[in-house]
Amino acid sequence: MLRLIFGGTFDPIHRGHIETSLSAFAHLSADCMHVVPSAQPPHRDYPGASATQRLRMTELAYAELPQVYVDDCELRREGPSYSLLTLQQMRAQWPTDSLVFLLGDDAFAKLDTWHGWQQLLSHAHLAVMQRPHHASQWSPTVQALYQQHRATECEDLHQRTAGHILTLATPAIDVSATSLRHAIASGGEWRHWVAPAVADYIQQQGLYLAK
Ligand code: ATP
């Protein structure tokens, strides 16, 4: 059983998240995907929408996909939303499954700044999606980690339960939550970058409007 785990702030969740994660899901022949919004993202200032609103948007975005579970474990936990804690929790729950943590190239480039990053690969594999127009220079530490753990094919991730890093040729979708928040605040075009139900929710809740 291969479980894909996709964490993020999702403020808001957009086509870059959905289309790339579903592409990774198909490419890896995953059995299911856990999408995990963070409660208190450790790497950024407090986001625009509340954790509950981001969870709701994530549920709306992946609705009607039976193999996708939107998981509120980081909202139920006290303290910062460290991915390591989530992976430890999932590893304890599913000791013999392959766990694959999915992240964009921009996030992977800074992996050595994450809490307990040296332990991540003891619990899960990492699958890295390309991120267009994010000139992300991997730090020497991240490059060394990749050389040590790189996998050449998807099958490697099924053979072991954790410990590999695989780069994926996911579709290049040039959008970020930051650009969407700016577009909403400034009256620009943004609806086509999110699922229709998410766009309706953003408008109903009056999210991301200029203060
Ligand atoms: P922000 O602009 O607020 O920093 P974001 O668009 O990067 O947000 P996050 O919620 O921080 O969204 O991202 C969650 C994960 O999804 C990260 O691993 C990130 O690299 C990845 N990701 C986000 N957008 C894309 C995209 N367009 N293509 C591929 N991966 C993406």
Image (cartoon, grey):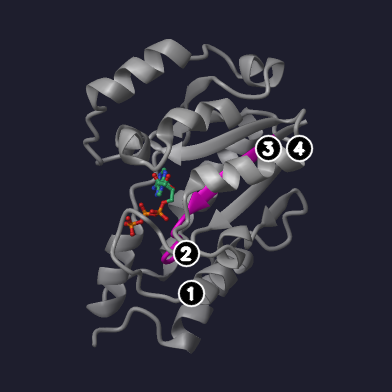
Look at 48% across and 34% down and name the residue there: 170
Label 3 sits on residue: 91
- SS at mark 2? loop
Residues under numbered marks 4 and 3 in contact, where contact means CB atoms less than 8 Å apart: yes
How many angstroms separate mark 2 from mark 1 (CA)? 6 Å
How many angstroms separate mark 3 from mark 1 (CA)? 35 Å
Q: Of the residues under marks 1 and 4, which one precedes in the sequence?
A: 4
Label 1 sits on residue: 199
- SS at mark 3? helix
How many angstroms separate mark 2 from mark 3 (CA)? 32 Å
Is ligand 1 closer than 8 angstroms to the Cβ of mark 4? no
Look at 58% across and 72% down and name the residue there: 56
Q: Which mark is residue 194?
A: 2
Q: Of the residues under marks 2 and 1, which one precedes in the sequence?
A: 2
Magenta segment, prevailing SS (helix, strand or loop):
strand
Badge 3 crowding class, 10 Å Cα cut-off, few under 14, some 14 to 19, many 20 or more, is some
**Residue 205, x across and y down, in percent:** 47, 87
151 sits to left or right of 141: right
